[in-house]
């Protein structure tokens, strides 16, 4: 007998696969597959749609993996040859950020947005822990929400403690797979527990002393939310290896800059010093946010010098 299912968990050599009837089987991968994949550390990723062949009622092996619509790769460094597929067939990413405890920089947010845009994955942005914000942090978060909303990224101010913003956020979590991402300690697992109370996933402590999360979630996990809708919890990330693109392409992944760059005098304008640069003009008269421009330069520099060491953002 054969069945199709969704990979919801990967513990190294074993995979949990949820069939469309809602039953979960723990399976291994057929030997034929193990040999074929060499470039990634995990031949099967969560989010994969796989075919199960049953040896008996309770035991199945994965015999086929459906072609992926997309996947997110994590490389530990730009030079690292081995890639790890974080998740496959993602419909959207939900980036959790914090103004504080721990803070998320706009450079980190913008690098995440540019990377997801390069992969064609829509992003929702949510600033969590609003219950802890000071008045000025609240003002700042609302300013960022307006900024990112105006670029086209739905953005929310939320708290998994007070429930603020949850009704609005829920309306954005529509069908398919939503990958939760962000630094350790921002509250990804807490948000899943809020939305799916019976999930009861372990959440971490926020270390006030070190001012960062404690990397509580160590493997990604697909949690069914409602019919046909899934949330993916994932380990906290520090930063990103640069996306594999040419320097001229960087603007393509900044929709706000891209719109304006069409007016630059030169087709190959890098928006740094060229005469007739519409981006610099827009920056000057406030139509482009300085933080976005700074992030653009940051990625541009990375693409020009891919092997240079950079600390996480
Ligand atoms: N004040 C406040 N604390 C929160 C909120 N949401 C989560 N926390 C706390 O933040 C800490 C970290 O939460 P987690 O959900 O484990 O964070 P995570 O993003 O899953 O972290 P990793 O698994 O390490 O990547 C916990 O102590 C939570 O109780 C919130 O809305 N307000
Ligand atoms: Mg977690
Ligand atoms: Zn320009």
Image (spheres, rainbow, N blue to C red):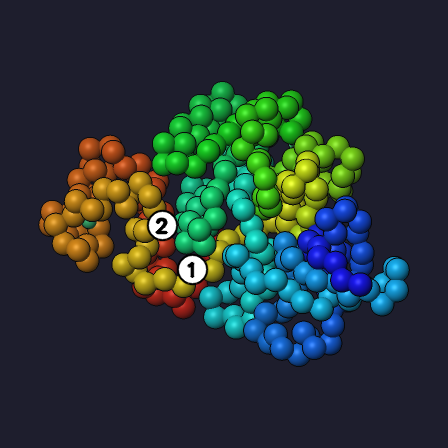
Closer to the camera, 61 or 216?
61
Q: Point out residue 290 in the picture as x, y percentages from the top left corner.
A: 30, 39
Q: Is residue 177 above or below residue 128?
A: below
The residue drawn where x is 76% and y is 62% is 2
Question: Disc 2 beta carbon < 8 A from ligand 3?
Answer: no
Which residue carries the number 1 mark? 243
Report the disc number at residue 224. none
Residue 179 shows in this picture: yes
Marks 2/1 in contact by CB < 8 Å: the verdict is yes
Q: Is residue 203 above or below residue 128?
A: below
Instruction: Say whether residue 230 is left or right of residue 274.
Output: right
Which residue carries the number 2 mark? 253
Assess disc 1: are there few (<14), some (14-19) or many (≥20) residues with their C-alpha within 10 Å of its C-alpha.
some
The residue drawn where x is 14% and y is 54% is 266
| Dot 2 or dot 1, earlier in sequence | 1
Closer to the camera, 303 or 171?
171
């Amino acid at each position: 007998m054969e069945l199709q299912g969704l990979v919801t968990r990967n513990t190294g050599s074993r995979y949990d696969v949820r069939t469309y009837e809602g039953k979960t089987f723990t399976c291994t991968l057929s030997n034929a597959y193990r040999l074929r994949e060499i470039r990634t550390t995990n031949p099967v990723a969560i989010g994969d749609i796989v075919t199960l062949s049953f040896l008996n009622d309770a035991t199945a092996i994965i015999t086929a993996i459906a072609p992926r619509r997309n996947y997110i790769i994590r490389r530990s460094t730009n030079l690292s040859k081995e890639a790890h597929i974080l998740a496959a067939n993602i419909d959207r990413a939900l980036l959790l950020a914090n103004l504080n405890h721990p803070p998320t920089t706009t450079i980190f947010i913008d690098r995440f947005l540019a990377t997801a845009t390069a992969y064609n994955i829509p992003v929702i942005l949510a600033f969590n822990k609003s219950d802890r914000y000071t008045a000025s942090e609240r003002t700042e978060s609302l300013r960022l929400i307006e900024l990112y909303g105006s670029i086209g990224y739905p953005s929310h101010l939320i708290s998994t403690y007070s429930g603020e913003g949850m009704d609005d956020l829920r309306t954005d979590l529509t069908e398919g797979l939503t990958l939760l991402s962000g630094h350790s300690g921002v509250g990804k697992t807490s948000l899943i527990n809020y939305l799916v109370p019976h999930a009861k996933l372990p959440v971490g402590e926020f270390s006030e002393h070190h001012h960062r999360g404690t990397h509580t979630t160590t493997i990604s996990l697909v949690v069914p939310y409602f019919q046909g809708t899934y949330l993916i919890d994932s380990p906290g990330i520090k930063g990103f290896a640069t996306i594999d693109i040419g320097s001229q392409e960087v603007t393509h992944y900044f929709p706000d800059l891209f719109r304006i760059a069409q007016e630059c005098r030169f087709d190959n304008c890098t928006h740094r010093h060229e005469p007739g640069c519409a981006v610099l003009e827009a920056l000057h008269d406030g139509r482009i946010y300085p933080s976005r421009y700074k992030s653009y330069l940051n990625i541009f520099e990375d693409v020009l010098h891919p092997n240079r060491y950079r600390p996480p953002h």
